[in-house]
Amino acid sequence: MIFNLLMSKLPTISYKELLKLLNQLDYQIDRQRGSHIRMKKILPKGHHSITIPAHKEIAKGTLNNILNKISQYTNVPKEELLNRLRK
């Protein structure tokens, strides 16, 4: 039930909208293979890479996982990331 509540909070977005958010957070495109784009951010202790599916609509579970990882590595709260996506 809690999972369903969290999923209902997530906006429906395209990969282009997610790429804009990642660019704002200093992620750069590392490479693309097929319908997947690999983004990379240089951090003080190395780098963080994340794969984004290049789909018109990103599945909510996939978006949730991506936002959790981004929040973990950038120390930006997930709620703030969601607010940026909704703007």
Image (tube, rainbow, N blue to C red):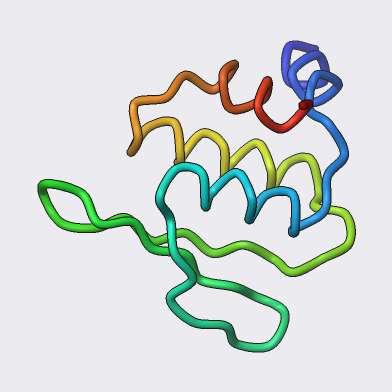
Q: Quadrant of the C terminus?
A: top right
Left-right relation of 77 to 85: left
Residue 78 coordinates in the image, percent (x, y):
54, 22
Report the front residue among 47 and 26.
26
Residue 49 coordinates in the image, percent (x, y):
38, 61
Residue 37 coordinates in the image, percent (x, y):
59, 73
Q: Is residue 87 above or below residue 50?
A: above
Left-right relation of 48 to 10: left
Q: Is residue 16 above or below residue 26?
A: below
Q: Quadrant of the N terminus?
A: top right
Q: Is residue 42 above or below residue 68?
A: below
Left-right relation of 6 to 25: right
Residue at point 67%, 49% (across, down): 18
Q: Quadrant of residue 51?
A: bottom right
Residue at point 80%, 19% (across, down): 9
Residue at point 64%, 50% (across, down): 20
Counting the numbered discs, the total is 0
In the displayed orientation, state which residue is furthest to the left.
45
